[in-house]
Image (spheres, rainbow, N blue to C red):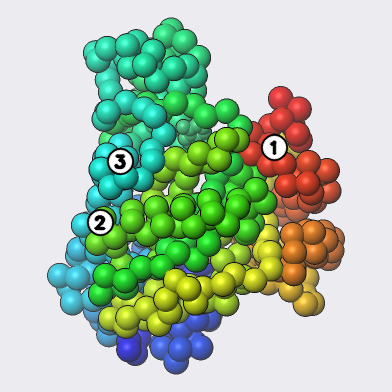
C-alpha cells in the first residue's frame, strides 16, 4: 500500500480524499494555488506545496509543477479528484513514466472514452445501446440534412470533447441545425481546443441514470447500482439520488451489466461511471463514460457502504476487488444536494466572497462534504460548488424529509447560496412523487 499520496485537486473533493487517506494511514500532500493558501485541504493535509498562480492553467492544470511536487515530497501516487487533470490521458501517462501511480484508469481507457463520438462507436460495437445519431463526427460540409432526417428531429449537436454541459445545442429543423453545427463547433474549439461535433436524437423528457462501476487491474468488475441525476439546470446536475425512482430490478440489472461490459471493453480499472439516458418506455441509451470519481459519488457510498475513494486507492495499489456482484446489495435511499455560491435570482451568477457564518447540519443520516469554514474567502477563480449535503433514509420519502430538515438547519452567511432553490425542489410535489426528468427545473420550477 502507498505511504504517501499527492492530491491534485482543491475544495471539497480534496478534503474528501484526504479524509480517506487519514483513515488508511496514508500521508497526504496537498497542492494549492496562490489563491488557495488558506483553503481547508491545505490545512488538513500533512504537507502542502504551492504550485502556481490562481488561474487553473497555471496551477491545478500545471503538470510539471504537480509532478515535481510529487517527486520532491516522495509521493508514490496521485489522486486527481474530478475536473482539472482527472480525465487527461497525457497526465495519467506522465505520472506512470515518472514512476508515480495515477489513481485512476490506464491512459488508454481515459483516451478511449474521452472523445464522446468515438466512445459511442466502441459501445455500439460491444452491444451497449447508444442514442441514435450520426455515425461519427459531422461538419457543415457533410450531408447533415440527410443524417438529421434519418435520425428524426429534434436533434442535439454535441461536442465530442464536451463536458460540464457545455457545447450542446438542440435543433428542430435544417436551418437551426446548420447554424448549430457551426456555432457548437466554434464554441467547442474555444472551450476544449477540439471543434469536433456529432449528432444525437434529442430525447424528450428522459431521465439521466448513471451506473457506478468498480474494476480492478485483474479483469474483474462490478456495478454498484445507479444514480438518478435528472434534476439539472443547463445540463448541469443539481440534485442526485439513488435508487432511481422508476427503475425496475430487471432494468437495473440490464443497465448494470451493460456498464460493466462498457468498462471491460476498454480494459478499465478504478472507479468509473457509465451515463445513460432512460426514456419513458424503459429504453436506455449510453451517452458517455466518466473515467474518474464523480461529484455525486457519496449517494452510492451511503447505500452500498463502500468508500469509493478507498476502493480506488486499493485498486491502484493492485488489490483484487474484495466482493462479487451478488454481494453488493444497496440499502435504503440517499439524496445529494449541490450547494453552490450562486444567485439563482440573478441568472445564477457566481457569488464568491467571505463566509461570515457557517453552521452545517448534523444528526442521523446527514453527511456534509465541504471545503469552507467561518472566515474563509471563496476565490472567484474556481467552480462555485462549496458544499454537498447528502442524506440517507430507509426509503426515498424519509431521505427527502431528512434533506428538508437538514437544508433548513444549514446556515451559510456572507455569500448567496442555492440552498433556498434546493428547498423549493425538495418541497415540489412532482419531485416528491419521483416524477423527474432532465427538463424538470425548466418546466416545474422556472415555468419555461
Ligand atoms: P456533458 O459531458 O457535457 O455532461 P452529457 O453527454 O453527459 O454531456 O449530457 C449532459 C446532459 O445533457 C444529459 O444529462 C441530458 O440532460 C442532456 N442530453 C445529452 N444528450 C442528450 C440527448 N441526446 N437527448 C436529450 N438530452 C440530452
Going from the N terminus, do you reach mark 2 or mark 3 first?
Answer: 3
Q: Distance between the residues labelled 2 and 1?
A: 35 Å
Q: Residue at x 69, y 37 (%)?
A: 441
Q: Which secondary structure lies at badge 3? A: helix
| Image spot of residue 5 (x, y percent) | 36, 80
Q: Which secondary structure lies at badge 1? A: helix
Q: Mark 3 points at which residue?
A: 124
Q: Residue at x 38, y 38 (%)?
A: 130
Quarter of the image where the N terminus is located: bottom left
Q: Distance between the residues labelled 2 and 3?
A: 13 Å
Q: Name the residue under label 1.
A: 441
Q: Name the residue under label 2.
A: 266
User: Relative to residue 94, is residue 185 drawn left or right?
Assistant: right
- How many marks on residues? 3
The vertical placement of 153 against 26, above or below, is above
Q: Do tag 2 and tag 1 residues touch (Cβ < 8 Å)?
A: no
Q: Nearer the viewer, mark 2 or mark 3?
A: 3
Q: Which secondary structure lies at badge 2? A: loop
**Residue at mark 3: C-beta within 8 A of ligand 1:** no
| Image spot of residue 94 (x, y percent) | 19, 65
| Image spot of residue 364 (x, y percent) | 77, 77
Label 1 CA crowd tier, 10 Å (few <14, some 14–19, many 20+)? many
Who is closer to the viewer here, 8 or 223? 223
Q: How far apart are marks 1 and 3 (CA)?
A: 31 Å
Mark on residue 259? Answer: none
Amino acid at each position: 500500500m502507498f505511504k504517501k499520496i499527492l492530491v491534485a485537486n482543491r475544495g471539497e473533493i480534496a478534503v474528501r480524499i484526504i479524509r480517506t487517506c487519514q483513515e488508511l494511514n496514508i500521508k497526504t500532500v496537498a497542492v494549492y494555488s496562490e489563491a488557495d493558501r488558506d483553503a481547508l485541504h491545505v490545512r488538513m493535509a500533512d504537507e502542502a506545496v504551492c504550485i502556481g498562480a490562481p488561474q487553473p492553467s497555471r496551477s491545478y492544470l500545471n503538470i510539471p509543477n504537480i509532478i515535481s511536487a510529487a517527486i520532491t515530497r516522495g509521493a508514490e501516487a496521485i489522486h486527481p479528484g474530478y475536473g482539472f487533470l482527472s480525465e487527461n490521458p497525457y497526465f495519467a501517462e506522465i505520472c506512470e513514466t515518472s514512476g508515480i501511480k495515477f489513481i485512476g484508469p490506464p491512459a488508454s481507457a481515459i483516451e478511449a472514452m474521452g472523445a464522446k463520438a468515438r466512445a459511442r462507436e466502441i459501445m455500439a460495437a460491444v452491444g451497449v445501446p447508444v442514442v441514435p445519431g450520426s455515425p461519427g463526427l459531422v461538419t457543415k460540409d457533410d450531408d447533415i440534412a440527410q443524417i438529421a432526417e434519418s435520425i428524426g428531429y429534434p436533434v442535439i449537436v454535441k461536442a465530442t470533447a464536451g463536458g460540464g454541459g457545455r457545447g450542446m445545442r438542440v435543433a428542430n429543423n435544417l436551418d437551426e441545425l446548420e447554424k448549430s453545427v457551426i456555432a457548437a463547433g466554434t464554441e467547442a474549439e474555444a472551450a476544449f481546443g477540439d471543434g469536433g461535433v456529432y449528432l444525437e436524437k434529442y430525447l424528450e423528457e428522459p431521465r439521466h441514470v448513471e451506473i457506478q462501476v468498480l474494476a480492478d487491474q485483474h479483469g474483474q468488475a462490478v456495478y454498484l447500482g445507479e444514480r438518478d441525476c435528472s434534476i439539472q439546470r443547463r445540463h448541469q446536475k443539481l440534485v442526485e439520488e439513488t435508487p432511481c425512482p422508476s427503475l425496475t430490478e430487471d432494468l437495473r440489472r440490464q443497465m448494470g451489466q451493460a456498464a460493466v461490459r462498457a468498462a471491460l471493453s476498454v480494459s478499465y480499472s478504478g472507479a468509473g461511471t457509465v451515463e445513460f439516458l432512460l426514456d419513458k418506455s424503459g429504453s436506455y441509451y449510453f451517452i458517455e463514460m466518466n473515467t474518474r470519481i464523480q461529484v455525486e459519488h457519496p449517494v452510492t457510498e451511503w447505500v452500498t457502504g463502500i468508500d469509493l475513494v478507498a476502493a480506488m486507492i486499493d485498486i491502484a495499489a493492485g488489490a483484487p476487488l474484495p466482493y462479487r456482484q451478488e454481494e453488493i446489495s444497496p440499502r435504503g435511499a440517499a439524496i445529494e444536494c449541490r450547494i453552490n455560491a450562486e444567485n439563482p435570482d440573478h441568472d445564477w451568477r457566481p457569488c464568491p466572497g467571505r463566509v461570515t457564518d457557517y453552521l452545517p447540519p448534523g444528526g442521523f443520516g446527514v453527511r456534509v462534504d465541504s471545503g469552507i469554514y467561518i472566515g474563509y474567502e471563496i476565490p472567484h477563480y474556481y467552480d462555485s460548488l462549496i458544499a454537498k449535503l447528502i442524506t440517507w433514509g430507509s426509503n426515498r420519502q424519509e431521505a427527502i424529509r431528512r434533506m428538508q430538515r437538514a437544508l433548513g438547519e444549514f446556515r451559510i452567511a456572507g455569500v448567496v447560496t442555492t440552498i433556498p432553490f434546493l428547498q423549493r425542489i425538495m418541497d415540489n410535489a412532482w419531485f416528491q412523487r419521483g416524477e423527474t426528468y432532465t427538463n424538470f427545473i425548466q418546466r416545474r420550477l422556472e415555468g419555461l
